[in-house]
Amino acid sequence: MIDQDDSHSDDDPCLDGTLRLPPGDRSLAGTMQEGRDLMSAELAGVDMRDADFYWAMFNDAMLEDAIMTGCDLRGAVLNKANMRGADLRKANCGLDNLGGSTDFIETDLSGADLRDANIGGADFTDARLVGAYLSGANAVSIMPDRPTSFRGTDLTDARLAGARLQGAIYDDRTVFPRAFKPEKAGMVFHSGRRKPRP
């Protein structure tokens, strides 16, 4: 006779605390997840549209091809997450109510769809947005002293036509699409490196 405790697999989220949902799952769509710890979550292809992820933690999460249209991601931390091909259309990734940024530091957003998203004040330092769609995205921060950061960001082949980029900062490591002129888009060169991590 099999002991019930031995029947659990090593993938059981109850054992290691990691949330794992299959592609197409809709259990998070439209739900309130404010401040939730979703670090290292495996949510590839999961439909989370219109969910409230204010201040949620997605560090190192697998969000490839995830559907996050209309999500509230203000103040969320998505550092080093895999968000390749994620659908973030009309998502709110602007500053939170205290002026804190939504962080995409070292996040892979290659091929992600950010059309009409609010990214004002977001931090894309050292992120990859290769081939990402940013048409209609709003990168204008509501707080001029907390600009959107594209320092060290790889924007190779990104679609930037129609994006509002006034005041967003970049540095000498930022890679833009061929023929794109950041100064003509109102972007500001910032030579200083971001503060090193403790």
Image: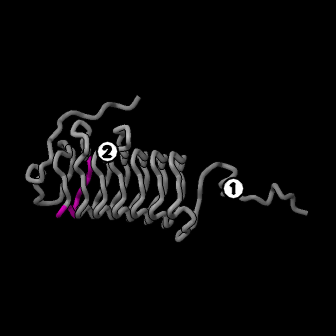
Q: Split into 4 quadrants, where in the image is the C terminus?
A: top left
Q: Quadrant of residue 188?
A: top left
Reading the image, the residue beneath label 1 is: 10
The correct choice, above or below, for 113 with respect to 183 in the image is below
How many numbered marks does the figure carry? 2
Helix, strand or loop under label 1: loop
* Residue farthest top in this picture: 198
Q: Quadrant of the N terminus?
A: bottom right
168 horizontally vs 39: left or right: left
Residue under the point 48% across and 59% down:
51
**Colouring scheme applied when the structure was drawn:** one colour
Q: Badge 1, how many Cα within 10 Å: few under 14, some, many 20+?
A: few
Residue 6 makes an appearance in the image:
yes
- On residue 123, which mark appears? 2
Could you tell me which residue is drawn at 30 percent across and 55 percent down?
118
When the figure is inspected, residue 97 is found, relative to residue 82, above or below; the finding is above
The image quadrant that residue 21 belongs to is bottom right
> In x, y percent, where is residue 181?
10, 54
